[in-house]
Image (cartoon, grey):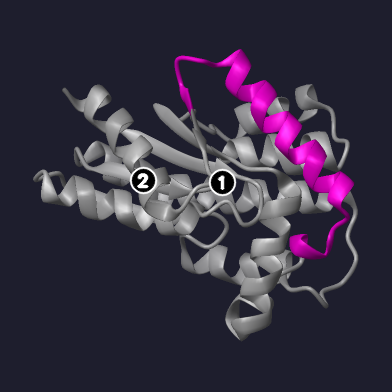
């Protein structure tokens, strides 16, 4: 099973992916945890280019193509081999992030994104957790984190975007969830981490029974 985690900045995805891995391993599952961008050596190099706040300006299409290059390498090097071995794959951000950020927020037409993605063989996940949060709350969380953690601040390019940008991202995610209800599980993420994970664990149990 291939499970992805999506959400606006500060929604708590990375923490919940790690907790999900521990939970599934406790049930005897073999689990690979990964992320985008940066799930491969090639991806790590692209991650610095894509997320560094003081990085060079780029056109929306240039940003899109870098994310898709990362995804193609990630699929071929990491995700597809793990699935072929029968492992569960958990990914912190994946193709829905591209649809929301480079599509809805940056303005690239959805059909153009999907056309290039088909050429690259981008697969859909089996299930997607959308950690839904008011983007203003999420940005506040993310910016406080960045103020305390230099490593996080070094990847804070998107936290510098205006609130309206992040509102478009959230709206796009909710529209995707509404369009694909069998794949998406929307998790309210305003509560504490334990309450959020309890909702995730309940969904996991229903999928795996």
Quadrant location, the C terminus: top left
Choose the circle earlier in sequence order: 1 or 2. Answer: 1
Establish if 203 lies above or below 5.
above
Asked which quadrant contains residue 147, the reply is bottom right
The answer to whether residue 182 is above or below residue 53 is: above
Tell whether position 101 is magenta. Answer: no
**Which residue corresponds to mark 2?**
197
Left/right of residue 80 with respect to residue 98 in the rendered view: left
Residue 41 in percent (x, y) is at: 48, 69
SS majority, magenta:
helix
Instruction: Tell me: 181 left or right of 25.
Output: right
Residue 138 in the image: x percent, y percent?
Answer: 67, 54
Mark 1: give few (<14), some (14-19) or many (20+) Cα within 10 Å.
some
Question: What's the mark number on residue 176?
Answer: none
The stretch of residues the image draws in magenta is 158-185
Instruction: Give the spatial CA distance, label 1 vs label 2.
Output: 12 Å
* Residue 169 covered by magenta stretch: yes
Which residue is at 64% across, 23% downward? Answer: 176
Which residue is at the front of the view, 52 or 150? Answer: 150
The foreground one among 114 and 19 is 19
The residue mark sitting in front, 1 or 2, is: 1
Q: Secondary structure at mark 2?
A: helix
**In the picture, which quadrant includes the N terminus?**
top left
The residue indicated by pointer 1 is 190
Left or right of residue 125: residue 115: right
Q: Residue at x 77, y 22 (%)?
A: 111
């Amino acid at each position: 099973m291939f499970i992805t985690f999506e959400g606006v900045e500060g929604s708590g995805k990375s923490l919940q992916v790690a907790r999900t891995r521990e939970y599934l391993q406790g049930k005897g599952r073999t689990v690979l945890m990964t992320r985008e961008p940066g799930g491969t050596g090639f991806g790590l190099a692209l991650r610095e280019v894509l997320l560094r706040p003081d990085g060079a300006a780029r056109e929306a299409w240039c940003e899109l193509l870098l994310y898709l290059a990362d995804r193609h390498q990630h699929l071929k090097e990491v995700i597809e081999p793990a699935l072929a071995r029968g492992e569960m794959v958990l990914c912190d951000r994946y193709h829905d992030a591209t649809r929301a950020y480079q599509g809805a927020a940056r303005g690239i037409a959805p059909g153009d994104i999907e056309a290039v993605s088909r050429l690259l063989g981008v697969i859909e996940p089996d299930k997607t957790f959308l950690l839904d949060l008011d983007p203003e709350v999420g940005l506040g969380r993310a910016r406080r984190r960045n103020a305390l953690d230099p490593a996080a601040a070094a990847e804070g390019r998107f936290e510098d975007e205006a609130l309206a940008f992040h509102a478009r991202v959230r709206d796009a995610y909710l529209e995707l969830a509404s369009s694909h209800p069998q794949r998406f599980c929307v998790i309210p993420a305003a509560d504490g981490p334990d309450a959020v994970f309890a909702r995730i664990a309940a969904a996991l149990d229903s999928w795996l029974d």
